[in-house]
Amino acid sequence: MEPIIAIVLALIGYALGSAKIINEGNEALVERMGRYHRKLTPGLNFIVPFLDQIVMEDTTREQVLDIKPQNVITRDNIYLEIDAVVYWRITEIEKSFYEIDDLQQALSNLTTTTLREIIAQNSLDAANMSRADMDRSILDLLNPITKDWGVNIIRLDIQRITPPESVRKSMEDERAAEIKKRAVITEAEGERQAAVKKAEGTKTSIEIISEVLRSHPESRDILRYLVAQDYVQASQKLSESNNAKIVFVDPANSTDMFQELIAESVTKEEPKTTSGNGNGAG
């Protein structure tokens, strides 16, 4: 009985030693006698004890690599502080283990170098306005290299681009000047439109008055009264101002001038009539 028990215990130990469970989202590498043998996928796997050894188990899920703030100089010689984040995933775990020694350190160094190179090719304004384009350019440079490491760079986000304090102050002053310029242009355009509307209203009023006077000549006395009334009201308003300079104008003369202007307009609008009779005696 003792040999049987020993064999059973040996088989149990062998089973326990050979069974390996790999969690979902992970993969593992097995070496046999010091050489790469095979890859273990998620679930229950069996290896040969004493001959096989799991040398690496890593995740194939997306990972995040935070790039520490870097001092970079732009094409127009402005020093910037750049902060970025890289999202990456292992696609071939064998290459990620055998082709590169320290994968994350290599990714960090490669991303930092490429980021500096891209920023150096752009001016400060271009760096601030074209982050999406720079992100794509960096990805296009990184992925051909990281493919040999069994890694795919999914996305790179430039989080912050921080110029020096003096540059930030100049940018704020420039934005403030641009806002003030737009406000002045808007105000001038509003005044121009108001002046045009006022001129159109005056023109329409004169045309209406001319038409009324042409149709009803007896309304001229009413017009004189209205002009005199407006003159009195305008004089009262001017007298209320401390800084106003009042120029006295004879209401009668101003009314006559306005009446002559209206009369001239009415004369232009009246149709010309012909006198005489074509059938009269000669």
Image: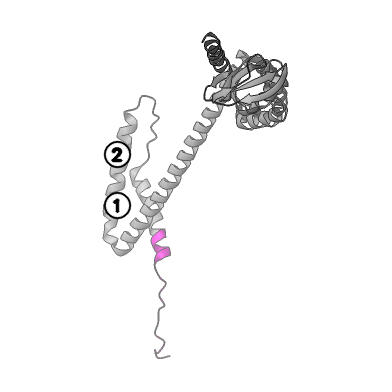
78 sits to left or right of 197? right
231 sits to left or right of 15? left
Quick one: which residue is furthest to the top in this view? 2
Residue 266 vertical position relative to residue 124 in the rendered view, above or below: below
Where on the picture, by quarter, is residue 146?
A: top right
What is the three-letter code of the residue carrying label 2? Answer: Val
What is the three-letter code of the residue carrying label 1? Answer: Leu
Residue 255 rendering spot, x and y as whole percentages:
35, 49
> For the point 68% across and 22% down, which residue is it?
96
Where on the picture, by quarter, is residue 209?
A: bottom left
Q: Nearer the viewer, residue 13 or 262?
A: 13
**Which residues are drawn in magenta?**
264-282
Residue 253 vertical position relative to residue 125 in the rendered view, above or below: below
> For the point 29% across and 61% down, which residue is it?
217
Q: Which residue is mark 1?
A: 223
162 sits to left or right of 278? right
Q: CA distance from mark 2 to mark 1?
A: 14 Å
Q: Which residue is mark 2?
A: 232
Magenta stretch encompasses residue 219: no
Residue 32 vertical position relative to residue 209 in the rendered view, above or below: above
Majority secondary structure of magenta residues: loop
Mark 2, residues whose alpha carbon is within 10 Å: few (<14), some, or many (≥20)? Answer: few
Residue 102 rendering spot, x and y as whole percentages:
69, 15
Residue 147 vertical position relative to residue 202 in the rendered view, above or below: above
Q: Nearer the viewer, residue 90 or 67?
A: 90
**Residue 162 in sight from this viewpoint:** no
Q: Nearer the viewer, residue 122 or 232?
A: 122
Q: Nearer the viewer, residue 163 or 107?
A: 107
**Residue 235 in sight from this viewpoint:** yes
Quick one: which residue is furthest to the front in this view? 1
The mark that comes first in sequence, 2 or 1, is 1
